[in-house]
Image (cartoon, grey):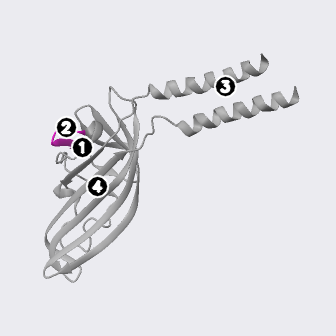
Amino acid sequence: MKKFSLLSGVVAVGLALNAGVARAAFIDGTVAFFDGFTTSALPSAPTHSIVSGLTTFGVKAVADTQNSGTGDFAGLPLLANAFAFDVNALPTLFFTTTDFTFTLLSATQSFSKPLGCDQGRCEDAIGLSISGLVSHPHFDATPFMGSWTAKGFCEGSAGECTNAVTGEWSASIATTASPVPVPATLALLGIGLVAMLGTRRSS
C-alpha cells in the first residue's frame, strides 16, 4: 500500500504539472517590421557614420508588417506602431499592433559595418540581437527573440557623407515559448519511480 501511494502521488504531481502547462495559451508565431528613421534621428552631412555608431534609434512612429505574420500573428494589419529605443535604457515599448504589445528587454550589437562609398553612393549598417516579451489579452505573455538591422545611405565619397543622409531598418521576431515541457515531467516521474524501487528493495 505504501509503494502504491508513493507512485500514485508522483503520477498525480506529474499530471498536475502537465495540466497546468497545457492550460497556458502561449503566443506562437513570427512577424517582421520595416520602416525608416525620423530626420532628426540621423546625423547631418558631413558625417563619417550614419547608423553604425548609434545606440539610440529614432524610428518613425509607424512601421510596415508587409503581411509577414505567421501563426498567431497571421492577418495582422499592414501598419503597426513603432517606438524609438535606446539599447542602454531597457526595457522599453517596442511595437504595438491590434492587441499585441512587444516589449524590448535586451538588445546587443551583433555586427557593425562602417561607412563605405562606391561611385558617389555610401552605406553603413548595424545589427542587433534582440529579445523581449509579447503580450495579448487572450494569451499568456510570451518570450520572443529575433534580429534588428539598420542601414544608412547617403551621397559622398572616401568614407564621408556629403548629402542626402537617410536610413532604413527591419526587425524579425519569433516567439520562443514551449507550452509542454515533457522532459521535465518525465524526469519528475523517473525520480518517483526510482524512489519507489528503493523502497521495494528495502522492504
In primary-sequence order, the first of circles 1 and 2 is 1
**What x and y, as percent, mark residue 65?**
19, 46
In primary-sequence order, the first of circles 3 and 4 is 3
Amino acid type, mark 2: Gly
Amino acid type, mark 1: Gly
**What x and y, as percent, mark residue 136?**
32, 31
The residues colored magenta run: 74-82
Give the Cα distance between marks 3 and 4.
52 Å
In primary-sequence order, the first of circles 1 and 4 is 4
Q: Residue 75 — which label? A: 2
Give the Cα distance between marks 1 and 4.
24 Å
Q: Residue at x 30, y 74 (%)?
A: 114
The residue labelled by disc 1 is 69
**For the residues bearing labels 2 and 3, Cβ distance under 8 angstroms:** no
Q: Is residue 161 left or right of residue 191?
A: left
The residue labelled by disc 3 is 10
For label 4, the crowd category at 10 Å Cα-Cα, with few meaning under 14, some 14 to 19 and many 20 or more, is some
- Where is 125 relative to 141, above or below? below
